[in-house]
Structure formats: C-alpha cells, structure tokens
Image: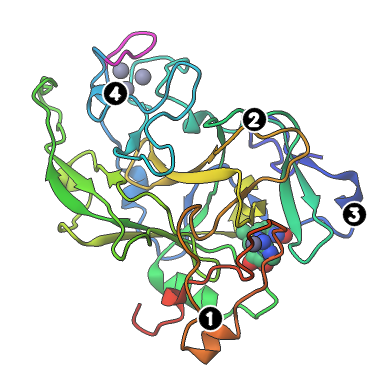
C-alpha cells in the first residue's frame, strides 16, 4: 500500500500490520499548498529562469552563480552542513531551460529513497523508516502541508488537546539586508536580477525554525534567505519571515517523522519556483535500512528551551521517547502560538 496514493515518484510503504484499523487518516499532498485564508499570490508568482542548455554549470548559469552551487554532482547538499550554511538554496525552476538532469534540481524531484511508515509501538505513534541506505547529505523528503496564516495556526493550536499529535511547523527566517555581489552576473534585459540579499540569523542565539509544541530551532548561526528580487516580499531588514506549515489534515510523508535528541536528518528551507519555502530534510549521516528517520525539533545543536513560567504551557509539554542516550526528557516547546499577540 502506497501512503502517497501515487503522488510520489516511488511508493511510500505502509507496514502490513498498520493497514487496517491503525492506518493514518489524512489527505496526501506532494508539496505545500495554501491553507484557508492564505494569500495565494506567493504560490503563483514565478521566479525567472536561466537559458542554459541541458545541465547548468557554476561558471555560466545565473541561477547557480547567484549564490554559488548548493549541490555537488552526486546530489549532496554542499552549502548547508547544519552549522555551515552561509547561503540560501535556490533551485532551477520551471522557467529554466535546463533539463531535469540539472544538478541544481534536487528537492523538486521528490523522494528517491525507499521509505516506510510504521507504528513505532511506543507513545510516539507512527514513525518513518528508511528501507535502504541513504548516504549523508542526500535529500530524503519535504515536510509539506497547508501553509497557514498566523491566525489559523493559532486557532488550530488552541484546539489541540494535550494528547493530540502536533504537526504545525513554524519556520522563522531572520532577515538581514546585505548587499549581494552580482558583479559577475550580467543583468538580463527585461528580467529582474536580484540586487539584495536577505540574511536570516537567529534572533536570540538559535531560534529559527519551530514546530509549535515541538519547537524546531535550526542550529544554523549563519543561514541566509535570499529572495530573488526586492519585490518578492515586503520585509524590512531585521524582520522575521514566519511560515506556518501544517501537514495534519493535508500533508506529505514528512508528517510521520518523529523528534529525536540525536537525529539523523536536518532541515533546510529550499526555494524553487516562488518565495514559499520548501522544508527539505537531508541525511545528517549515512542512514541504514531499518533505521527510524528523525530530526531534532529544536535543532540538532540548539539547547532545548528551559521550562517556561507559563503553567498552561508547562502542562502541555510532552515526554520525549526518542531513546537517545542524551535525551533531553521533553519535546521542545514553542510558546509563540499560545501567546495572544505572538
Ligand atoms: C510531526 S508528528 C510525528 C508523527 C506522529 N508520530 C504520527 O503518528 O503521526 C509529531 C508528534 O509525534 C509525537 N512525537 C514525535 N516525536 C516524539 C518523541 N520523541 N517522543 C514522543 N512523542 C513524539 C508527538 O505526539 C508529536 O506531537
Ligand atoms: Zn539548471
Ligand atoms: Zn542554468
Ligand atoms: Zn536555472
Ligand atoms: Zn529525546
């Protein structure tokens, strides 16, 4: 049985034992879609493409030259090794003339390694498992779902009961305006060429990506978000670009990935056709067949936030069952969606 119902390149297997009563109920989407009330403008606006034939090369492709190559010829992410991300990831897009074999097309191609959804037979519920070896820095899958407004994300969060699984992912990109060097990229007539970069850096040391009850904090001290043009988004430097992704009702295979305090995946925002980020999960080490996939909801190097003063929030914290020797005890927690004005 294919959990993706034919949406992915290869079937996402569901363990035999889980095919009857225990089968998860949700609608499958391969990529992010606008949720209720979300402005669809960001989804339809299209980045410009390159005119390269066949495959793109760093010396000649403006898509790659803009920020340097993101992937090597083996398809491994090279610019974002968790703590060394110093540039954003922009792939070639549907306007580009290059073929699907272009090395700057990875996340958009989708799932390449065999995966299985299986009940963990623990308090974690379902989990996602590798059915074959996944080498380090290879793309595994997206964490995709409905892109929500803050209002809708808060409304859904408030409706959650303590025992409910929480899937809402909050991506916070801290924007710093820096001057880009485009001296070697000839402007194309009639097409907008990026003249600014927006760097996002942790506001308070490390908070950058968060899943509301289970806070995701990217460890990247130096990640950038480069928007393809000034017009892509109306944000001033030092503002935070927040994206809420909820795969609870409509989502992809990423919704089954559990938290671990010693994970084997890391998450990177990747942009393809438009400014809506794809949350892309890559292997942080070689992963072997049979291993459960996991990422650290609070970032693989960031500390789990200390207990909060807010009793209501404290009572919502969940025990972590990751089994890692240095387990922090609780799932990370982000209060922002519980604040009245966050
Ligand atoms: C994104 S979902 C992961 C998939 C989920 N296990 C399922 O069955 O669909 C996140 C939820 O899974 C559970 N979970 C994830 N990691 C966990 C962990 N390390 N310990 C306990 N529960 C966990 C929590 O209930 C959390 O709200
Ligand atoms: Zn290309
Ligand atoms: Zn190109
Ligand atoms: Zn291109
Ligand atoms: Zn743990």
Q: Nearer the viewer, residue 325 or 317?
A: 325
Residue drawn at (31%, 39%), measured in percent from left and top?
88
Helix, strand or loop under label 2: loop
Q: Does the beta carbon at disc 2 come under 8 Å from ligand 1? A: no
Q: What is the spatial separation of the Cα atoms under label 1 and label 4, in whole angstroms? A: 42 Å
Residue 206 numbered mark, or none? none
CA neighbours of label 1 inside 10 A, class few (<14), some (14 to 19), many (20+): few
Residue drawn at (51%, 52%), measured in percent from left and top?
300
Q: Which residue is mark 1?
A: 158
- Tell me the magenta residue range: 51-58
In the picture, residue 192 is in which quadrant? Answer: top left
Q: Is residue 91 left or right of residue 8?
A: left
Closer to the N terminus: mark 2 or mark 1? 2
Residue 20 numbered mark, or none? 3
User: Pointer 2 and pointer 1: residues touching (CB < 8 Å)?
Assistant: no
Q: Which residue is mark 2?
A: 134
Q: Is residue 55 magenta?
A: yes
Residue drawn at (43%, 19%), measured in percent from left and top?
103
Closer to us: mark 2 or mark 3?
Answer: 2
Helix, strand or loop under label 4: helix
Task: Work out which quarter of the rendered image holds the N terminus and state it.
Answer: top right
Q: What is the spatial separation of the Cα atoms under label 2 and label 1, in whole angstroms? A: 37 Å
Residue 193 visible, this orientation: yes
């Amino acid at each position: 049985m294919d959990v993706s119902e034919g949406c992915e390149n290869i079937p996402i297997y569901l363990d035999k034992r889980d095919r009857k009563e225990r089968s998860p109920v949700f609608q499958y989407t391969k990529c992010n879609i606008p949720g209720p009330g979300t402005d669809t403008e960001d989804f339809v606006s299209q980045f410009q493409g390159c005119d390269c034939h066949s495959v793109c090369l760093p010396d000649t492709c403006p898509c790659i030259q803009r920020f340097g190559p993101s992937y090597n010829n083996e398809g491994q992410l090279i610019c974002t090794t968790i703590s060394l991300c110093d540039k954003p990831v922009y792939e070639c897009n549907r306007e580009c003339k290059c073929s699907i074999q272009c090395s700057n097309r990875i996340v958009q191609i989708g799932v390449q390694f065999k995966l299985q959804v299986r009940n963990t037979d623990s308090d974690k519920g379902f989990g996602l498992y590798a059915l074959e070896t996944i080498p380090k820095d290879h793309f595994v899958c997206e964490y995709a779902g409905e892109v929500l407004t803050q209002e809708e994300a808060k409304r859904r969060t408030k409706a959650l009961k303590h025992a409910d699984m929480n899937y809402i992912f909050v991506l916070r990109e801290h924007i710093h305006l820096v001057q880009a060097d485009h001296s070697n990229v000839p402007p194309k007539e009639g097409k907008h060429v990026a003249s600014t970069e927006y760097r996002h850096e942790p506001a308070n040391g490390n908070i950058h990506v968060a899943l509301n009850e289970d806070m995701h904090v990217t460890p990247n001290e130096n990640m950038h978000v480069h928007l393809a043009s000034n017009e892509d988004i109306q944000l001033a430097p030092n503002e935070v670009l927040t994206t809420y992704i909820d795969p609870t009702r409509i989502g992809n295979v990423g919704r089954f990935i559990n938290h671990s305090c010693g994970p084997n995946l890391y998450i990177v925002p990747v942009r393809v056709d438009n400014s809506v980020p794809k949350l892309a999960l890559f292997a942080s080490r070689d992963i072997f067949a049979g291993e459960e996939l996991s990422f650290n909801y609070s970032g693989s190097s960031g500390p789990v936030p200390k207990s909060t003063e807010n009793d209501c929030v404290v009572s919502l914290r969940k025990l972590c069952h990751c089994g890692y020797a240095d387990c922090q005890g609780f799932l990370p927690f982000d209060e922002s969606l519980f604040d009245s004005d966050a």
